[in-house]
Each structure stands twice: as C-alpha cells, then as structure tokens.
Amino acid sequence: MKAIYLDCASGISGNMFLGACLQLGVPKNFLINELEKLNLNGEFFLEISDVSKNGIGAAYVDVKILHDFEPEKIQSDRPNIRRLHRHEHNQTHHHRTFADIKKIIDSSSLSENIKKKSLAIFSQIAAAEGKVHNKPADEVNFHEVGAIDSIVDIVGCAICLDYLEIEKIFVGKINVGSGFVQCAHGLMPVPAPATAELLNGFRTFSFGAEKELTTPTGAAIVKTLAEFRADLPEDFTSEKIGYGAGTLNLKIPNVLRIYLGEFSGQTSKKLVKLETNIDDMNPQIFGWLYEKLFAAGALDVWTTNILMKKNRPAQMLSVLVDDEHQADCIKIIFEETTTIGIRITEISRRVEAVRKMAKVLTTWGEVFCKVSAFDGKIVSITPEYEDCKKLAEKNNVPFKAVWQEALTKQEARLG
C-alpha cells in the first residue's frame, strides 16, 4: 500500500505538510483548483515558492488572506482573483465554530473522501480545544485554527493525500519547540495546550529553538491520521522524499521531511469492537451518530436488528475502532445515544485487502472506484456511491447506469 513517513525533526504545521506534498508530486494548479471548490468567495490565495532552509531546498506555501492587503494592489497583481472582501486592516480574522467549518466543507463540491478526512481532522481540534476551555466541541470558537489559513491547510492536506493515494501514515518523534507563544488567550507555554492535548500518545521532544515548531493544525493531522514509529518501518520502501518549509529561519533546517513509498507490513494498532443494545432511541439519530463516529476515527460502524426482553425490537450498535480513538468514540456513544453501558471486545487480528482509489471517465463524468487486492490479485472493484449519485442527479440518468458503466470501464482498464 502507498504510505508516507513524517520526519518532524523541526516540527510540523499545515503549510509545511502542503509544501512537502507539492515536492512529492501534487501539481500546484491541481491543489489550487481543488481548494476553489470550498467556495470561499476569493477570501485567500496561495503563494508558493521554492526556498532554501540551511541549504535544503523546500517548497514554501503561504496562505494569503485577501483582506490583509490593499484590494487595488491585489487586483492589479493577480487578475485571476475575481471577488474580494474589502475589510479594514484593523479588523480581526473571522472566528468560526466547528459547525461553521463543517457547513463550509459539506456544502463544497469536494469528493466525499476529502470531506470526511478534513472533518475528521477538524473534529480532533474541536475536541482538544473543547477540553482545554471546558466547552462542548461544537461550541468552541476556533480562534487561530478557525482562521481561513487553517481551513485551507487542513482541506489541502486531505486533497494532497487523496491525490497521492496514501493509505497509511507513520510519524516519528515530533519536535514541539519550547518557550512561549502568543495565542488569542494570551501567552501560552509551548506546546500550546491544544497542541499538547492532540499529541497525547506520541513521542515528542524540544530542540533547536525557543519557538512553536508544531502547530495545532500540524498536531491534528498527526493525531487523526498517523501511527507512531520511532524509525522508518522495516517493511517501508522509500521511493521519493519531499521537503516542506516552515516560516521561521532557525539554527536547524526548518523543514518537514516526508518519505513517500510502499508499505508491505502489518500495522501495530490494536483494534476493539464497541457494542451496545439500544431500544428506546429515535432511529433518526443513528444517521447523525454514524457521522460523528466516523469523524472521530471509527473504522466501521453498523447496526443489527435484535430482539430484547419481552420481544422488544432493538438495534445493536457496533463500532470498530483502533485503541487510539477508542475513548473518543465511547464518549460520543454516551453523549449521543440513550445507552448506559458499552461492551468492549479486543480484536486480536484483522486481515485487510490492499485498497487503492482509481479514477475512471464515464459518459457522464469521472467516478472514483475502490480497487481491492489480496495476495497480489484484484478481488473487488466498487464505484464510489457519492460520485455515481452526483452524476446521476446532474445528468438525470439512472444511478445503476452510471454505476455499471464505471464498473465495466474500470474492469476493462485493469484487465
């Protein structure tokens, strides 16, 4: 399977991640065009440049907020920017809640896979900020991470991972920096409280600068998507290396190094199955519950029709989750359902087929198909439901016609 290894010797931030992905092969124009699907009305543009950090060539991605600049200057320098927000320079960045950010991402025309990954990362930030400030996650005012640059960084991360078809992410020890950082609530020790919360369970260290080297955005990417490995896994074969530059100039090279390659081994995460029987809850809540659990890191969620005492119909909720995200899913189940008890079963082993997303062009548009292989042979091809649904609605054709053509063309393409 395609995998990456994050070498965070100088920490990690969202723009460092984007820069490294650009060096790994994500086309600049592709990233920009995909980000336009957020429909943020020209609130930002990306400034991408090649820089040198202590002799290491890296890509630097800077998210420019348009109301930080003179509109006339931007219009003359960048004629492709169509709409501008003409705010005064002393106006602060707009703070957004998790609900605001979810609405932006859900209403975009990004693929469902990108939406899901982006919301999962933001969900982790919301949970961490909520714990730090003693507020429910949905009520957290995101401050710095709610600013437009962090939305772009996180969604851009999901876009890059989707383009590179990454299935597994590993991370080594993370340099968090030291000293103090200015936040919306005043001076905070490094790592900032939310960053420290997000990096629970990962190995961190401080070296090279009294600065914040790992941001909440970078920590959230790690928390949501990565598995700790002190060194490159033995079964990981590196094929390419990309460097993403940070903003600061330090005594150490301020870059995130990402190894891209193939991983053929087994992951070390422990899996558990959470189960509970529910017979007194509005069934409409299950749809909401599924979304929350997947955003929190659940690998799979399903319900089974059962009969309880006195033949009362009920639903058995089952959630497959790794050990790292178990606590978050348990919390969601207790908060969002009527259950008062959860059974936890350890899964000793799970055999997985290797899965990759492959794009195919149908009569009505592009459809991604999930291609699964085991023991070196393709075992199944499944067109993505949401892609087929959108094309069927847009072109007023039967869903099954889109689905069948996508499957047939992908099968022929793969032989």
Image (cartoon, helix red, strand yellow):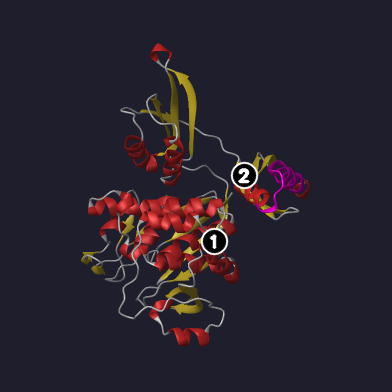
Note whether 213 is above or below 357 in the view shown.
Answer: below
Seen as rendered, the residue at the extreme front is: 396
Front of the two marks 2 and 1: 2
Kindly identify the amino acid type of the residue bearing the numbered disc 1.
Cys
* Image position, residue 254 (x, y; %): 40, 72
Q: Which residue shows up at 35% across the image and 63% down it?
A: 145
Residue 60 in sight in this render = no
Badge 1 local density, few (<14 within 10 Å), some, or many (20+)?
A: many
Query: Reading the chain from its start, which is encountered first: label 2 or label 1?
Result: 1
Q: Which residue shows up at 38% across the image and 79% down it?
A: 68
| Dominant SS in magenta | helix
Q: Which mark is residue 385?
A: 2
Toward which corner of the image does residue 347 lie, by quadrant? top left
Badge 2 local density, few (<14 within 10 Å), some, or many (20+)?
A: some
Residue corresponding to mark 1 = 160
Q: Nearer the viewer, residue 207 or 180?
A: 180
Separation of marks 2 and 1 at Cα, in angstroms: 22 Å
Q: Are marks 2 and 1 in contact (CB under 8 Å)?
A: no
Kindly identify the amino acid type of the residue bearing the numbered disc 2.
Tyr
Q: Which residue shows up at 58% across the image and 68% down it?
A: 33
Note whether 192 is above or below 93 in the view shown.
Answer: above
Answer whether residue 398 is magenta in the image. Answer: yes
* Image position, residue 370 (x, y; %): 63, 45
Answer whether residue 119 is magenta in the image. Answer: no
Magenta region, residue range: 394-411
Toward which corner of the image does residue 159 lie, by quadrant? bottom right
Residue 388 in sight in this render = yes
* Image position, residue 4 (x, y; %): 52, 56
